[in-house]
Image (spheres, helix red, strand yellow):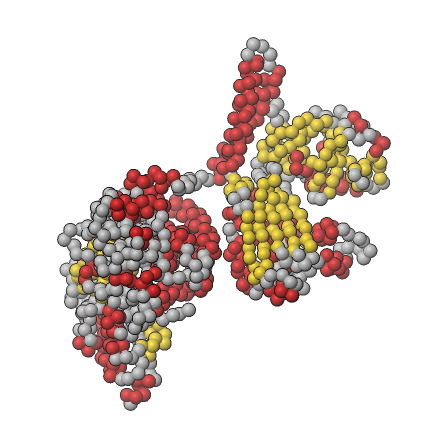
Amino acid sequence: MAELDLAQFHDTFFEESFEALDSMEAALLKLDVGAPNPEGVNTIFRVAHSIKGGAGMFGFTDVASFTHTLETLLDELRSARMQVTTYIADQLLLSVDVLRAMMRSVQRKEPVDMQRVADVQFDLEAIVASKGGSAPAAAPTVASDANAAVVGVAVGAGPAGAVAAATVAGGWEIGFRALPELLLRGNDPLAIFSSLAELGPLQARVNMDALPRLRQIDAERCYLSWTLQLTSDCSREQIDAAFDWATGDCEVTVQRLSTVGPGAAEATAAGQSAATASGAPVDGSATASAAAPTLTGAALATGAAAGAAGAASAGAASGSAAGSAGAASAGVAPGGAASATVTAPSTGAPTPGPAAASAHATPPAQARAAGPDAPKAAGAEHSSIRVSIEKIDELINTVGELVITQAMLSEVGRKLEGPFAEQFRSGLSQLERNMRELQESVMRVRMLPISFTFSRFPRMVRDLAQRLGKQIELKMTGEQTELDKTVLEKIGDPLVHLVRNSVDHGIESPEARIAAGKSPVGTVHLDACHRGGSIAVEIRDDGGGLDKNRILAKARSRGLVGANDVLNDDQIHELIFLPGFSTAEKTTDLSGRGVGMDVVRRNVKELGGKIEIASELGKGSRFIITLPLTLAIVDGQSVSVGTETYIVPLTSIIESLQLQSQSASRLSGRGEVFSFRGDYLPIVRLHEVFGVKPRASVLHEGLIVVAEGDGRRIGLFVDDLLGQQQVVIKSMETNYGPIDGVAGATILGDGSVALILDLTGLIRVASSRAAA
Amino acid sequence: MTEAITTNKPLRLGSTTLRDVTALQAELADRLDDSGSVQIDASAVQRIDTATLQLLAAFVRDLRADGRLVEWTECSAALWRAAHALGLTSALDLAVDRT
């Protein structure tokens, strides 16, 4: 029998996991130390859980084992048995790093750095253990208390008990008691438990009541019994399989746990006593009282329904259905209330109010588990499918072709005469509207919110600030602003540079800030918004600002600026974009090596964007990056030169004007110039650049398009302006080869090809021609 | 002689399994007769089983009943994991704050 090749799903798994880790990191950073945030912890838990599930399925055992440990800690946190401390938050962030590194190694089939993994894993385990054990402040040294040792659960009444959520998780509760011969026959509970733990998170509660004094012990006999909670949607058979070898040497009871609402507790499996009845003298208030951290979605509905169904209020059993465990149990037991399971032997501890049960479930589980409430729950979810970028690009391409075909038809329609011409034209205009909508929708598919890029900054700023001993608050606004995936991917690194610069050079040390009369906490603000057809991303800090004198002095000392040159603010700011320019007094490993700003600008330019600086000494700096929304279409002005049509991107056009021949003058060595608002701009005759025979060769017969590129302006001399239109960019580099001054090509309505001008390149070409 | 042992010499725990639990039991029983806290160095534990952990749990419990404590000077990950898996970390007083 051919086995299903799981390898084909690896890529998807990794892709999803990396995304999941990003969201986990983001959620972690939002966790407030000391302030409980059950929803946040839940999100993190779900991420860890799904990674574990995937890793287990694909046989990435190291990843699965690590996430399992992580999940155990998160489970403690989400059930409020433990509070998030700074140390725990740090360890969790570290875990994200470790997981990322592990997955990357696994993905590349490289060896995993197991030492690091083991270290962090050990720390995580230690956290769980230390809190679980140190919580019971009530006489930990009394022997009888030790009998009720509940791992990871706060034992004991009082405040700890009050905040402790029930220990019950969705999945299975297994009672396990070893018979005397178990160990001698080579069966070790450890092995059994570890095979159970492969099915899902396993929590063991030991009962040592039967354990005699040390001297009386028959060392080869097992006196212990356990209550195990397995959070898993596995089948009963899978559980039984774990005990296969020990059959006859132990007593096992298995029962399913359900998401149980307040007061709805009733035994399911007839004839099976609740496993907890095996005698763990667990303090009722510890296991049962659940101060509801969250009650979400459909799980709430199920719980409420169960309560309403009038099930006996036997006590507080709070089910936390992790993963699809909730779904599985609800599938077997429709209605929930009828077959709710006794999960805590704690009739003596009534729940504090109806909201006391904490029922967690992953969204899909909720949707499936809720029965009649399912549609409502499903509506609240985001559903999505994963589509490869090639498929989308293919679609965009086809739509581009359609747009061209439609434009061709429009041309024909305009010339058409006859009885149906009008009808044809109205049909065409409708087609045009629909085409535009179709094109926009398809383009939107490629659009992603900029939060994908922003999400890495909270962590980065936090780490940097810690390392530099600065206090920095990162504000982010406009994260939902969408832009093309390609632009998004390429803007990441420049933004990292800028944010680093702000943190490293911009924001001063707390002492310096206080001395300057500022709050010791510096602010770095990231903002994104749409501006017309482009997106503006701004990085703003309230730090020291750019020191113009220092920049100028540095530039002079390097001979970049003549000793007597007078520069205005903008020109001085421009200096920091020069390669190798850095005014940092000492080079840190973060920035100040002089690489960065020139790379930033180059990257932004490559995307057809620009970067501006505004800065005030002592008050802070603003870096504004303006980017096109997409690289696939451009708003262009079509101009004609001879028989050719060229497209000038609208974003680079300042204005168009007609010039009298006498307004232009010829400078030796610098070509033709004309006066434009107090500046002299060079005139670039497009027909000369592209070797086309023009219709207008005298200036006043044609038009001048004043355009900007790379901070410089030129006057493009053309025959005529034709019209403005959105054009689909076809790459010249892919289809032909790079041409200086040409950004790409497009196909016009009449089927002819028009070149799209790249102003930056064109200015370079023109100035080299003028110099020649 | 006993004096010296009680206060100073830590109990070195190695990888113990069912085969040598009886020896361990005798050693632990000896320690019960001492006074003061018992230090255990479990850094060398690579493998450990339920029988051993059960003995240790009984030992720790009996010590506590005597008003005495166990101090784990070192604890290997293997021991820790096994204790955790069996729900015995508290019973073994392994639940120290490692932060």
- Position of residue A687 measured from the top left corner of the image (x, y, whole percent): 74, 31
The residue sitting at the bottom extreme is B1
Left or right of residue A743, residue A702 in this image? right
Q: Residue A71 lies in what quarter of the image?
A: bottom left
Residue A261 x/y as whole percent: 28, 50
The residue nearer to you, when weighing A313 against A417, is A313
Up-down: is A688 above or below A377?
above
Q: Position of residue A663 (x, y in %)?
A: 83, 33
* Residue drawn at 30 percent across, 73 percent down: A139
Q: Position of residue A763 (x, y in %)?
A: 72, 40
Asked whether the viewer can see residue A129, the reply is no
Residue at screen point 29% across, 66% down: A156
Residue A408, quarter of the rendered image: top right
Left or right of residue A552: residue A348 = left
Residue A470 picture quarter: bottom right
In depth, the one of A242 and A303 nearer the eye is A303
Between A317 and A740, the one nearer to me in the picture? A317
Q: Is residue A151 above or below residue A390?
A: below
Q: Is residue A385 left or right of residue A627?
A: left
Q: Residue furthest top?
A: A419
As drawn, A515 above or below A58: below
Q: Which part of the image, by quadrant, shows the N terminus of chain A?
A: top left
Residue positioned most to the front: A353
Answer whether residue A213 is visible to the viewer in this image: yes
At x 33%, y 57%, the residue is A291
